[in-house]
Image (cartoon, rainbow, N blue to C red):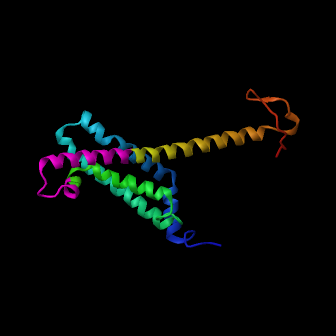
C-alpha cells in the first residue's frame, strides 16, 4: 500500500535528494564547510573574511534547505531519526563560522571585553564540535560507498562459484561452501 511519501511531490523531492549529482554536491559542500574557515585563516587575508563568512552562510542555508526537504519527503525523519539530529547539529554549528551572527546572538551590548573573549572561545569550541559532526556525516557517506563496493565484489565472486568448483580456489581463496549456479 502506498503512503503519502510514495507519491507526488514528496516522492520527487526524495528522488532529487537521492540523485547521485545532488549527493556529490552536498558532499563537496560538506568538505568545503569543514575546511574553509581554517584554510582562510592560514592562506587568506583580512579582506577575504567577509567572502568566507557569506559562503559559510550560503552553505548553512543549503544544509538547512536539505534538512527541511528531507523532513518533508522522508517518512519518520523529522524529530525521529538520528540523522535528523546530526544534520541539525551540523547546520547549527555553521553559525560559529560567522562572527557577526555569534556576536549578535551571544554578546549583549553591555558585556565587558573579558566576557566577550570567553564567549568567542566558547563559539570556537562549538564550531569545532560542529566540524566533528560534519566529519561524522562525511564518514557515513564514505562507509556507504565502501559497503556498495563490497556488495558488488561479493556478487561478482558468488556468480563465479558453482557446485563443481568445490575445493578449488577463486582469487587465491579456497571455496569451502557449495553454491548453486544460477
Judge by depth and name the residue closer to the eye, 10 or 82: 82
Q: Quadrant of residue 104?
A: bottom left
Q: Residue at x 66, y 43 (%)?
A: 151
Magenta residues, start to end:
103-131
Instruction: Look at the image and say whether residue 76 sits in the magenta stretch.
Output: no
Instruction: Left or right? Give the position of 98 relative to 84.
Output: left
Q: Choose between 170 and 140: the one closer to the eye.
A: 140
Q: Is residue 117 magenta?
A: yes
Q: Residue sitting at 49 percent across and 57 percent down?
A: 82
Q: Quadrant of residue 143?
A: top right
Please give the name of the residue rendered at 15% of the width and 46% of the height, measured from the top-left corner. 114
* 2 over 175 or under it: above or below: below
The answer to which of 22 and 110 lies nearer the viewer is: 110
| Residue most extreme to the top | 172
Residue 155 position within the rendered picture, expressed as x and y whole percent measured from the top left: 71, 43
Q: Position of residue 140 (x, y in %)?
A: 51, 46
Q: Is residue 85 left or right of residue 165?
A: left
Amino acid at each position: 500500500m502506498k503512503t503519502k511519501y510514495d507519491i507526488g511531490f514528496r516522492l520527487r523531492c526524495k528522488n532529487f535528494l537521492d540523485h547521485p549529482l545532488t549527493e556529490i554536491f552536498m558532499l563537496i559542500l560538506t568538505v568545503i564547510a569543514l575546511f574553509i574557515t581554517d584554510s582562510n585563516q592560514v592562506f587568506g587575508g583580512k579582506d577575504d573574511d567577509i567572502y568566507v563568512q557569506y559562503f559559510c552562510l550560503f552553505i548553512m542555508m543549503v544544509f538547512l534547505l536539505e534538512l527541511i526537504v528531507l523532513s518533508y519527503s522522508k517518512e519518520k525523519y523529522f524529530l525521529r531519526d538520528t540523522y535528523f539530529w546530526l544534520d541539525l547539529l551540523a547546520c547549527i554549528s555553521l553559525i560559529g563560522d560567522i562572527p557577526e551572527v555569534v556576536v549578535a546572538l551571544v554578546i549583549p551590548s553591555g558585556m565587558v571585553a573579558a566576557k566577550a573573549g570567553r564567549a568567542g572561545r566558547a563559539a570556537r569550541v562549538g564550531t569545532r564540535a560542529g566540524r566533528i559532526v560534519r566529519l561524522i556525516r562525511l564518514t557515513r557517506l564514505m562507509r556507504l560507498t565502501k559497503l556498495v563496493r563490497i556488495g558488488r565484489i561479493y556478487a561478482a565472486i558468488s556468480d563465479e562459484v558453482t557446485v563443481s568448483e568445490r575445493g578449488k580456489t577463486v582469487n587465491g581463496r579456497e571455496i569451502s561452501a557449495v553454491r548453486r549456479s544460477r
